Image: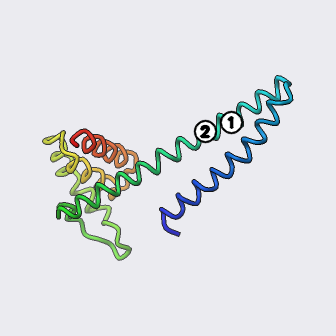
Amino acid sequence: MTTRAGALLMAALLALYLVLVGWRAVQFVATGEPVAVGIGVALVVLPVIAAWALWREIAFGVRSQALVRRLETEGELHLGLPLLASGRPDRAAADAAFPAFREAAEANPGSWRAWLRLGLVYDAAGDRRRARAAVRRAITLERAGR
């Protein structure tokens, strides 16, 4: 199953869950009992938070894929990292190449391209937290530059 199909399946399941739980929440609130009302409110609030988090992740994925495609179209996506048989970049090579990409991003802090490349190298090196932060910065910079 592709990542996109998985995300769409999760979104559909969440929508179904919201409908079913929403109905149960209305029933709890309708009783008028304080504990039941509290449960009913929680049944509405918690899935809404989950839906918001899912939406953020889907939006991040869509925006980051669009930037990667744009960079690829411009011919600037190549990171110069050797690939393993699986198609993933070699982690040791990514670690070795990382300082050059970090310096490029620091030298040009307003370039979404430099930050996206840095995020891709972070990802190749296995540092997902910093990869996501760099890609988020690239998305913010690209959107501000429109």
Provide residue 121's location: percent of width, then percent of height. 28, 55
Q: Nearer the viewer, residue 42 or 18?
A: 18
* Residue in view at x 22 percent, y 46 percent: 112
* Residue in view at x 70 percent, y 47 percent: 19
Q: Considering the image in quadrants, where does the C terminus appear?
A: top left
Outermost residue to the top: 34
* Residue in view at x 30 percent, y 45 percent: 139
Where residue 133 sits, quadrant-wise, is top left
Circle 1: residue type: Val
* Residue in view at x 61 percent, y 56 percent: 12
Provide residue 80's location: percent of width, then percent of height. 19, 65
Circle 2: residue type: Val
Label 1 neighbourhood size at 10 Å, few (<14), some (14-19), many (20+)? some
| Tag 1 secondary structure | helix
Where residue 30 sits, quadrant-wise, is top right
Q: Which residue is mark 1?
A: 44
Q: Which residue is mark 2?
A: 48
Task: For the residues labelled 1 and 2, say whether their Cβ atoms are less than 8 Å apart.
Answer: yes
Q: Is residue 5 left or right of residue 42?
A: left
Q: Is residue 136 left or right of residue 109?
A: right
Residue 14, relative to residue 86: is it above or below? Answer: above
Residue 15, relative to residue 42: is it above or below? Answer: below
Q: Nearer the viewer, residue 14 or 127?
A: 14
Provide residue 92's location: percent of width, then percent of height. 29, 61
Outermost residue to the left: 107
Residue 132, relative to residue 6: is it above or below? Answer: above
